[in-house]
Image (cartoon, rainbow, N blue to C red):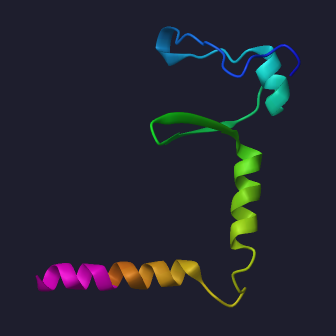
């Protein structure tokens, strides 16, 4: 990113479309056809390549034991919460 300033003005087009300048796309490794994940963080729009999000999530849960079922734990928590709601 040789000539790209720290901030770039981008205009929101029809139907909410954004055009990311080529220098910024190159810096971020964004290529035509990539799937990006958009999320809001502290009032900002964050765009990330789907592959990077998947890598980050895999790394985050890599330490979870293979014998442990997070799905079963979540279901049990939801059932307990539903029972508490019924009791109230």
Q: Nearer the viewer, residue 50 or 12?
A: 12
Percent x, y for residue 46?
59, 37
Q: Nearer the viewer, residue 28 or 36?
A: 28
Magenta residue span: 80-88
The C terminus - image quarter = bottom left
Q: Is residue 80 left or right of residue 57?
A: left
Percent x, y for residue 86?
15, 81
> Is 12 drawn above or below residue 88 in the view shown?
above
Q: Is residue 32 visible to the viewer in this orientation of the structure?
A: no
Percent x, y for residue 72?
51, 83
Residue at 21% over, 84% down: 84
Q: Is residue 9 left or right of residue 31?
A: left
Q: Main secondary structure of the magenta part?
A: helix
Residue at 52% over, 13% down: 12
Give the number of marks: 0
Residue 82 located within the stretch drawn in magenta: yes
The N terminus - image quarter = top right
Of all residues, the one furthest to the left in this rendering is: 88
Q: Is residue 45 left or right of residue 22?
A: left
Residue at 67% over, 36% down: 36
């Amino acid at each position: 990113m040789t000539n790209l300033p720290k901030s770039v003005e981008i205009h929101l087009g029809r139907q909410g479309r954004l055009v990311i300048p080529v220098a910024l796309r190159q810096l971020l490794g964004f290529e035509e056809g990539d799937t990006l994940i958009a999320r809001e963080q502290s009032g900002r729009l964050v765009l990330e390549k789907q592959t990077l999000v998947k890598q980050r999530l895999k790394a985050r849960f890599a330490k979870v034991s293979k014998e442990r079922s997070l799905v079963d734990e979540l279901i049990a928590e939801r059932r307990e919460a539903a029972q508490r709601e019924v009791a109230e």
